[in-house]
Image: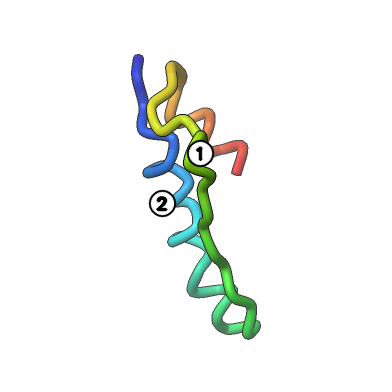
Amino acid sequence: MSIDLIEIIKQVTDTFEVKAEEKKIKIQQKNSVDFPSMVLGDSVRISQYY
């Protein structure tokens, strides 16, 4: 199954953003131009990793 890896990383980043702001920590998502956006895998398992 193809998944949008960049979107999954964004969702995980958004999840932690509120807690980070409370602690005055800035979270940024930066992707290299050669970073693959679509990959084969399981989005649930990848989200659990982060």
Residue type at mark 1: give it. Ser
Residue at coordinates 56% horizontally, 73% vertically from top-left?
A: 19
Q: Residue furthest front?
A: 33
Q: Position of residue 40 (x, y in %)?
A: 43, 16
Q: CA distance from mark 2 to mark 1?
A: 9 Å
Classify 10 Å Cα crowding around label 1: few (below 14), some (14-19), many (20 and above).
few
Quick check: marks 2 and 1 in contact, CB under 8 Å? yes
Q: How many marks?
A: 2
Q: Which mark is residue 12?
A: none
> SS of the residue at dot 1?
helix
Q: Where does the C terminus fall, quadrant-wise?
A: top right
For mark 2, what is the residue? 11
Q: Position of residue 49 (x, y in %)?
A: 61, 37
> SS of the residue at dot 2?
helix
**Quadrant of the image occupied by residue 39:** top left
Residue type at mark 2: give it. Gln
Depicted 31 relative to depicted 1: above or below: below
Q: Position of residue 9 (x, y in %)?
A: 48, 46
Residue at coordinates 51% horizontally, 48% vertically from top-left?
A: 31
Colour theme: rainbow
Q: In the image, 14: left or right of 25?
A: left
The numbered mark, 2 or 1, whose residue comes first in the sequence reads 2
Q: Where does the N terminus fall, quadrant-wise?
A: top left
Classify 10 Å Cα crowding around label 2: few (below 14), some (14-19), many (20 and above).
few
Depicted 21 relative to depicted 43: above or below: below
Depicted 1 relative to depicted 36: above or below: above
Residue at coordinates 51% horizontally, 57% vertically from top-left?
A: 29
**Quadrant of the image occupied by residue 28:** bottom right
For mark 1, what is the residue? 47
In terms of depth relative to the viewer, which is nearer, 11 or 38?
38
